Image (spheres, rainbow, N blue to C red):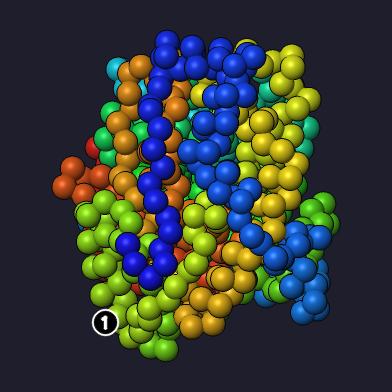
Amino acid sequence: MSDGYDLTDLKAPRTAGLMLKGLVKLAEGPGGDLLAAKFLADVGVEALRAAKVEDGPAAEHPLLRRARAEGCGASEKLVELPAPATHPDDWPFETASDFVEAYGRGETTPSEVAERLLRVAAELDEGKTPLRALINRDPDDLRTQARAATARYAAGRPLGPLDGVPVGVKDELDQAGYPTTVGTRFLGTRPALEDATVVARLRSAGALLYGKLNMHEIGLGVTGLNPHHGAARNPYDPTRATGGSSSGVAASIAAGLNPIAVGADGGGSIRIPAALCGVVGLKATFGRISEHGAAPLCWSVAHVGPLAQDVRDCALAYAVMAGPDRHDVNSTAQPPVDLTGWDDRDLTGVRLGVYRPFFEHADAPIVAACDAALQDLRRRGAAIVEIRIPDLALARVAHMVTITSEMVASQAQHYAKHRRQYGHDVRLNLALASRLTQADYIHAQRVRVRVQRHLDEALRHCDAIVTPSTARTAPELPADALLTGESNLEDTDRIMRFAAIGNLTGLPAISVPAGFDDQGLPIGIQFMGRAWTESLLLRLAGAVEAGVGRPAPKVHRRLLT
């Protein structure tokens, strides 16, 4: 590595099964302090403690402070919903517009689609490798929604481009009538009484909200292994992981259960599973999409957002979900939601920043696919500029300290009573993270201000920063981890490597498929931009999508034919 690049691979022994159980017992007992000291040193906390940082922690999120200084307030949407996408005849996925057009032509009805969806979802959970994307469904509720949508189409009064379109919701967000388990076995003992804001907006647009989708327990993991609900499986290879924590969300889209679903992202949890499952995932600017009704897990790095089978559907879902919400103060300081030019494939004048040592810190097939995508963007008129991003090692540990400290705090009311009901991987992470100090958290926020400044400087020289989405493709689902989860620091680091800096700074980022490795596993490329530039990111993602073929996954169904 060169040019001051300081990010090195994290290393620690992998554990699962009986060995993980023993490690958890040690971590939760008197010997836990020694184990935690070793682990925290391995992930860089000692380096964080020793770092000289001049900045003070921001009194509020840096992006929100800037937005208020620039006079942004609670503004109405100015966005026009995107027109239907044009794909090759062999495009394997059904788009939102495919559903709407089929209903409009009278070829099928939302009620017929709902019945097919219930049947297909049940079929995909059979056999030795059940998909386990959907963990809670209410057929009567779905049929009620579908009858209402069918009646609207019969009357010639559909609500718009999402009416009758199946949409799934990660079980981290409230959906009226469903419990919100957050991937646990003990939360969500009662159904939610009302929808989360984004769910309510999708419902108002006529979406068929068909059930709750699987996730890594409390979002504290990036594989999708869940010992309570079963591991979500990757439709491109059911022996592989989906990525997490929005595991069932990405799996459901790739498998054809829905063209759009709602995810949440505290450290890559939208973009990682999107990359590993070959779909599109957008983490918008911090505060752009309301968090009201989402489980309060990691307040300062949390984002709700869409995953979709193509960029147009991602743009459509974003347009419906985004905008200020009086229930979420973090959403009230933002400029109008704007999709101007999102589908312009002429990239003349767009500057793409590449920090080459960072970009190449991934497996060779991933680097090659992302480089090929870059060259295609260059042919469309984009300029590739070299940039530098200092302190990436500090940024990684500052994010880790921030998200795990906030998750420990979020579970404080449950931990004493339910500690033994968490999966063993989550128990280990909570036990180790509880050894972090208040000083560690404050110092991480000081580093956060520095990293924000570094990215501001990089983005003075370019319009978007380009990296792979992950440093490896989907890992195998190990048999010894299905009932306990696993502790695998090396894989976690490789999967999260490019994602966490977007959460630490709150800048928007998108993952879009860029190709496949020699085993047929999807590869994602990530674009990260300035605050509120989601339209540009969708434009870049759409340009990549136009140049990349996408075969159907091994596990895939169609609901319209």
Residue furthest to the bottom in view is 349
Mark 1 residue crowding within 10 angstroms, few (<14) / some (14–19) / many (20+): few
- Rendered-image quadrant of the C terminus: top left
Residue 258 visible somewhere in the drawing: yes
Q: Toward the viewer: 346 or 275?
A: 275
State the count of labels: 1
Question: Label 1 belongs to which residue?
Answer: 379
Quadrant of the image containing the N terminus: bottom left
Residue 282 visible within the image: no
Residue 471 against residue 431 in the figure, above or below:
below
Residue occupying the far left of the picture: 518
What residue is shown at x 49% (from left), y 59% (from top)?
392
30 shown above or below 13: above
Could you say where residue 254 lies in the image, as x and y percent from the top left?
37, 43
Q: Amino acid at mark 1?
A: Arg
Percent x, y of residue 36: 57, 28
Q: Is residue 435 left or right of residue 366?
A: right
Q: Nearer the viewer, residue 408 or 371?
A: 408
Q: Please indicate whether residue 344 sits to the left or right of residue 425 in the image.
A: left
Tell me residue 240's x, y (percent): 31, 33
Does residue 174 appear to the left or right of 99 in the view shown? Answer: right
